[in-house]
């Protein structure tokens, strides 16, 4: 109770980004609490803190983890004033001459500059597209080539491959290809043409997948996944491109999240992890619902097939209305805090389509597969039955949560999450272990019946109290 007795309610229940309050004696443990603290959980945590203080177990465990982190930083040879120790009551900063947030901003901008396509690389992609378009036109005058994915949605980087699909105008279907499946068109019509092209090489033919593709290599430098009649992917690409063009911070945050996920080992559907598309949606959703950001949502219908215009009139309107003074470093810090503390894992749905926090049990998600399971839920903006957690394994989801925990811990130490800046070798793995210990300790401290992160909710939407908008009403 001594932790909270002199603290105002706004500080206890405020955003974790404003947690540091040494003058009031607020401990780090006091703010490592689940999101939207209610009175029952607050009482449970205060009682647990008092118990641990009497036994000394909490202090001992914290000191052990602090010493372990300091030893890792020291062994890496990069603890020369950059990464301090958390032992004791003080916390050393990496530099006494530069604001930590400004230093993080500089590191993030450097990473963006490193991964942004150079002019010659963009020109090479355009050349590849043009030559592949010429091949596709041999199918007939009604056929065209369209790019989708990272190469076309504005969130691409130097290591992004090219996703392309052959589209046939439905009103111009000819007898030569009309009766053929997508797999047959790729195998019987396109593959022979591509083999004759001197600049393309067929690496693999994946024709039995739900979306058949030819995996190509262009000039031994660019990987291309070529599909056929994959029109659904185009509207997703247009939607993400709209968000990328709305503000460069949206694009940059989406790129940084993917760089972090790759470096943390939590990216890749083939390994049981989320796809880069899912992480981009998570970044956009955070910006939409966070009270300090409030990015306007773009109506998905404006970017769907058959919509009037191309949807970018909505982008211009949102750009004129939205004002946000936060830097890229501010956004990165808040994103990791949001998914570490505030997001309701297992109950809340990441839904840029709606752009507001809602439960998986709400009627607007009645078609979402697996919504009753306590898993991370990410709704596809167009295929509303598709839950993008379908590729995510149970262990991989736990690793993802631990990665968010560890990234937040590194930010609190004045460092950058993996993939976003320089860091001592092995420090992230050490923080993953610290995050796991902290979570297990927090769960053990909660009294029976207490509402913990991702376990039960109030009557309102996520992030709202009981007086919030009615459950399931998207227009409230």
Image (cartoon, helix red, strand yellow):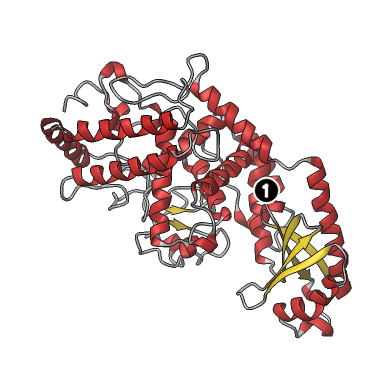
Question: Residue 248, located in which quarter of the rendered image?
Answer: top right
Q: Position of residue 373 (x, y in %)?
A: 35, 63
x then y, percent, for residue 95? 49, 18
* Mark 1 Cα-neighbour bin, 10 Å: few <14, some 14–19, many ≥20: many
- The percent coordinates of residue 115 (x first, y second) are 67, 41
Q: Nearer the viewer, residue 148 or 71?
A: 71
Q: Is residue 426 left or right of residue 153?
A: left
Does residue 292 lie above or below 122 as drawn? Answer: above
Q: Secondary structure at mark 1?
A: loop
Using the rendered view, name the quadrant where residue 60 is placed. Answer: top left
Query: Which quarter of the image is occupied by the N terminus?
Result: top left
User: Residue 161, percent across and down?
Assistant: 69, 55
Residue 432: tell me if it is visible: yes
* Residue at numbered disc 1: 156
Total numbered labels placed on residues in the image: 1
Q: In this rendering, would 431 be left or right of 265?
A: left
Residue lying at 29% horizontally and 41% vertically, measured from the top left: 438
In this rendering, the answer to whether 179 lies above or below 371 is below
The reply to whether residue 466 is in sight is no
Q: Residue at x 15, y 50 (%)?
A: 448
Q: In the picture, residue 275 is in which quadrant?
A: bottom right
**Among all residues in the image, which is located at the extreme top?**
97
């Amino acid at each position: 109770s001594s932790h909270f007795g002199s603290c105002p309610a706004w500080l206890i229940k405020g955003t974790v980004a404003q947690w540091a309050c040494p003058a009031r004696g607020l401990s780090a443990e006091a703010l490592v609490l689940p999101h939207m603290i209610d009175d029952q959980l607050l009482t449970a945590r205060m009682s647990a803190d008092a118990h641990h203080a009497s036994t000394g177990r909490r202090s001992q465990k914290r000191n052990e983890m602090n010493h372990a982190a300091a030893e890792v930083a020291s062994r890496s040879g990069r603890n020369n004033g950059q990464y301090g120790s958390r032992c004791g009551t003080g916390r050393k900063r990496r530099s006494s001459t530069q604001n930590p947030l400004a230093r993080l901003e500089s590191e993030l901008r450097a990473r963006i500059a490193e991964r942004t396509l150079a002019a010659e690389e963009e020109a090479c992609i355009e050349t590849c597209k043009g030559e592949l378009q010429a091949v596709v036109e041999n199918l007939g005058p009604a056929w065209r080539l369209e790019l989708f994915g990272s190469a076309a949605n504005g969130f691409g980087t130097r290591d992004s491959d090219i996703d392309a699909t052959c589209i046939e105008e439905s009103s111009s279907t000819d007898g030569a290809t009309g009766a053929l499946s997508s797999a047959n068109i790729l195998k019987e019509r396109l593959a022979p043409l591509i083999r004759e092209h001197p600049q393309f090489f067929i690496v693999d033919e994946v024709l039995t997948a739900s979306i058949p593709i030819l995996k190509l290599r262009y000039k031994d430098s660019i990987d291309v996944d070529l599909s056929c009649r994959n029109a659904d992917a185009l509207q997703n690409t247009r939607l993400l491109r709209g968000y990328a063009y709305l503000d460069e911070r949206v694009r940059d945050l989406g790129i940084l999240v993917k760089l972090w996920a790759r470096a943390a080992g939590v990216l890749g559907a083939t390994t049981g992890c989320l796809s880069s598309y899912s992480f981009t949606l998570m970044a956009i959703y955070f910006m939409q619902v966070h009270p300090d950001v409030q990015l306007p949502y773009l109506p998905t219908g404006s970017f769907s097939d058959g919509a009037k215009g191309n949807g970018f009139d909505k982008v211009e309107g949102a750009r004129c209305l939205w004002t946000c003074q936060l830097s890229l470093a501010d956004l990165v810090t808040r994103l990791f805090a949001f998914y570490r503390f505030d997001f309701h894992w297992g109950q809340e749905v990441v839904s840029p389509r709606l752009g507001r926090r809602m439960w998986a049990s709400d009627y607007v998600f009645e078609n979402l597969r697996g919504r009753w399971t306590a898993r991370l839920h990410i709704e596809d903006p167009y295929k509303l039955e598709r839950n993008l957690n379908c590729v995510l394994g149970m262990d991989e989801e736990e690793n993802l949560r631990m990665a968010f925990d560890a990234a937040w811990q590194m930010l609190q130490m004045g460092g950058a999450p993996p993939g976003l800046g320089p860091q001592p070798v092995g420090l992230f793995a050490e923080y993953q272990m610290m995050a796991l210990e902290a979570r297990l300790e927090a769960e053990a401290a909660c009294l029976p019946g207490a509402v913990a992160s991702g376990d039960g909710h109030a009557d309102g939407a996520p992030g709202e109290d009981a007086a919030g908008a009615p459950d399931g009403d998207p227009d409230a």
